[in-house]
Image (tube, grey):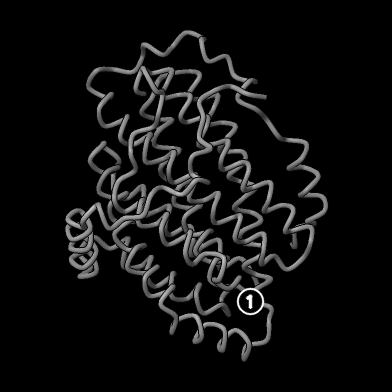
């Protein structure tokens, strides 16, 4: 059944929340163990940056939205992803993981920095069919594996309160993501094919693929290192296919078919794809940092302050 986007927008407006709604001084912060702390700090830092990557993606999607209502929804999603990042930063402050003097977030890893550069350079020029397929893939992986894993590993009730709110937001994001994907698939097949071929030939998409593959595998390797069973991530990635198949027309989107096949390689630990992906992670680690551009100003809106 198609989603009533006007009703969805009304629900989104009604379900807004703020960091000020959370009691950040409530008991439970001491439940983070010394053993958990180093890897959890790195995990949370990456999660904050990834949320902001999602925010930038929704900002680009708002410019391509098929209707004014969906454009407004994407603008809310943009703000929500930024709020998620700020809430995660506030959790890091609560757990004593930020620099005490500046309160700043640790620098993003090189793969996230590359994703920032790519978004800043190419995202606004990407077609709706590209952005409208890649964003759902990342959202499903984030919602299905990273956030749920964190809730299982961390015994802080404030963390659970925060991520209950974040998960509720993400569930609405995913519902809209796949509804729009289905709408994209309803377009004329010739138009979809021309748009796809035109996108594949662009430097932006080629560079994006080179950036995306090691980013996804790096996240996979890091969360496995924290104790997440790979099958949990694989099941989350498989969900991208199952949700896409619910739509009557989603299968007609060429980018969806490409990412579905990519997902099949990702979830197969014996697939030769992982040799390529992990090699790209290795290469990216040795990429000269001086060649990276400064962190964009729109990423510097992160704050742990519980503003309303």
- Picture quadrant of residue 15: top right
The one nearer the camera, 283 or 158, is: 283
Q: Secondary structure at mark 1?
A: helix
Q: Quadrant of the C terminus?
A: top right
Quarter of the image with the N terminus is bottom right
The residue under the point 53% across, 15% down is 24
| Residue at x 37%, y 41% (from the top left corner) | 46
| Count of labels in the image | 1
Image: 241 above or below 172: below
100 with respect to 287 (left or right): right
In the rendered image, residue 158, in percent from the top left (x then y), is placed at 50, 19
In the image: residue 58, left or right of residue 118: right
Q: Is residue 100 left or right of residue 303?
A: left
Q: Position of residue 231 (x, y in %)?
A: 32, 50
26 left or right of 75? Answer: left
The picture quadrant where one finds residue 164 is top right
Image point (67%, 59%), residue name: 62
The residue carrying mark 1 is 185
Specify few, some or many for label 1: CA neighbours under 10 Å numbering under 14, 14-19, or 20 or more: many
**Residue 224: x and y, percent?**
26, 44
Residue with the most extreme bottom position: 190
Residue 64 image point, x, y percent: 66, 67
Query: Is 272 situated above or below 95?
Result: below
């Amino acid at each position: 059944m198609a989603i009533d986007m006007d009703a969805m927008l009304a629900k989104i407006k009604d379900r807004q929340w703020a960091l000020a709604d959370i009691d950040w001084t409530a008991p439970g912060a001491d439940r983070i163990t010394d053993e958990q702390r180093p890897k959890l700090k790195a995990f949370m830092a990456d999660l904050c940056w990834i949320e902001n990557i999602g925010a930038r993606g929704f900002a680009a999607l708002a410019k391509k939205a098929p209707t004014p209502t969906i454009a407004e929804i994407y603008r809310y999603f943009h703000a929500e992803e930024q709020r998620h990042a700020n809430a995660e930063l506030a959790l890091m402050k609560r757990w004593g993981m930020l620099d005490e003097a500046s309160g700043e977030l640790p620098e993003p890893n090189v793969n996230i920095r590359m994703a920032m550069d790519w978004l800043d350079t190419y995202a606004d020029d990407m077609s709706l069919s590209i952005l409208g397929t890649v964003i759902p893939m990342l959202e499903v992986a984030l919602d299905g594996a990273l956030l749920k894993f964190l809730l299982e590993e961390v015994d802080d009730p404030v963390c659970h309160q925060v991520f209950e709110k974040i998960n509720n937001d993400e569930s609405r994001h995913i519902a809209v993501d796949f509804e729009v994907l289905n709408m994209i698939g309803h377009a004329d097949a010739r138009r979809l094919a021309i748009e796809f071929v035109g996108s594949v030939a662009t430097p932006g998409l080629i560079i994006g693929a080179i950036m995306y593959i090691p980013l996804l595998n790096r996240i996979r390797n890091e969360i496995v290192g924290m104790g997440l069973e790979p099958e949990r991530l694989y099941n989350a990635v498989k969900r991208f296919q199952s949700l896409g198949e619910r739509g009557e027309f989603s299968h007609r989107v060429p980018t969806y078919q490409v990412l579905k096949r990519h997902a099949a390689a990702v979830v197969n630990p014996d697939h030769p794809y992982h040799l390529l992906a992990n090699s790209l992670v290795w290469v990216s680690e040795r990429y000269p940092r001086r060649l990276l551009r400064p962190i964009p100003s729109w990423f510097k809106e992160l704050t742990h302050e519980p503003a309303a």
